[in-house]
Amino acid sequence: MVRAFPKALNWIGLVVVVMSLWLAVRLVWEQTVWTWNRGPQMVGVSLIHGGLGIPLLLALWGGLFWIAAVVIFAALSRSFASVPTRILVVLYGLAWVLVETPYGFWQRLLVEKLAHGAHAPEFLSYAAALGDLQTVEAFLSQGVPVDARNREGSTALHGAAVEGQLTAADYLLARGADMNAVNRYGETAPTCRGFSQRRAAREFAEAKNNATKPRKILCANKWKSGRERSQSDAQPQGRGERARAARGARCEHYIGA
C-alpha cells in the first residue's frame, strides 16, 4: 500500500516553490523587460536592496533540504511521491533552471531588439567585459560597430581590457577593433591595468612553456631518397661512421629549447 506523503511536507514545499518561482520570475524580468528598456542591469541588486532578496534566496537554497526530505521519505516508505509533490518538485527544478540561466542567454535571445536600441554599445562592452564571446559575436553580427562607444566613451575592447579578458580582446582585435581608441578618462585598452597585468602573465606563461617544451629536430638523413640511402649504406663505414649512420637512421629526435 502506498503511504501518503505528510501534508506538512507538501505545505513546506508549496511555500518553497512559490518563493523560488517569485525569485526566478523577478530575475527573468530584470534580464528581459528591464534590460531592453533600461540597458544592462546589475541583476538582483535592486531586489536585495528592497529587502525581499534575502528571504527569497533563503527559500531557494532551503528548498534543497526539502528535496532531500522528500527523497528520504520516498526511500523509507518505498513509494513514489504523490502527484502534488511531484508537481512541486518539477516547479522547484524549473525555478533553479531560470535562476541559473546566464544573462547572456537572454541577451542573445533578444539580440535583434537590443542591437538596434540606444544601449547597444553598453551591451557589447558588458559582454566583452565578461568574456562572453557568444554574446559579443551576436551583437557584432547584428551590425553593432566593433568600436561602438558607451556613455563613458569606452569601446568593447576597453571593457575586455579592464577585466583582463584576453581572449575577448584578441577576438575584438581580429574583428578590427581600434587598440588606440581613447575613452573619457584618457585610457586606451593597453593602458588599462587589468589588461596589461594579464597579458604580461600570459606572455610569461607562454615563454616559460616554450622554454621547457621539447622541439622536434629532423635529421638530414630523412630527406634522402631511398636510392641515396641505399648507396650510402652500401659504402664501407668505419666504426665512427657506423655510429653516425645509426643515429641518422632514427631520422628524428627531441631536444630541449
Image: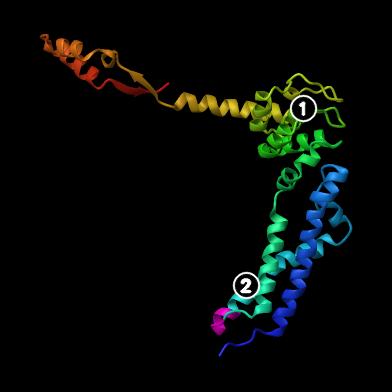
Q: Badges 1 and 2: C-beta atoms under 8 Å apart?
A: no
Q: Secondary structure at mark 1?
A: loop
Q: Nearer the viewer, residue 173 or 220?
A: 173
Label 1: which residue?
145
Relative image position of residue 184 (x, y in whole percent) = 87, 25
Q: At x 75% / y 75%, what residue is drawn?
A: 14
At label 2, which amino acid type do we have?
A: Ala
**Above or below 40: residue 81:** below
Label 1 packing within 10 angstroms: few (<14), some (14-19), many (20+): some
**Above or below 225: residue 71:** below
Q: In the rendered view of the protein, which quadrant contains the N terminus? A: bottom right
Tell me where residue 247 sits by quadrant: top left
Relative image position of residue 119 (x, y in whole percent) = 84, 37
Q: Secondary structure at mark 2?
A: helix
Which label is found at residue 84? none
Q: In the rendered view of the protein, which quadrant contains the C terminus? A: top left
At label 1, which amino acid type do we have?
A: Pro
**Above or below 58: residue 109:** above
In this picture, which residue range is highlighted in magenta? 73-79
Q: At x 74% / y 20%, what residue is drawn?
A: 178
The magenta stretch spans residue 77 = yes
Query: In this image, 213 relative to 135: left or right?
Result: left
Q: Main secondary structure of the magenta part?
A: helix
**Above or below 183: residue 125:** below
Tell me where residue 98 sits by quadrant: bottom right
Relative image position of residue 193 (x, y in whole percent) = 74, 28
Cα separation between marks 1 and 2:
50 Å
Which label is found at residue 68? 2
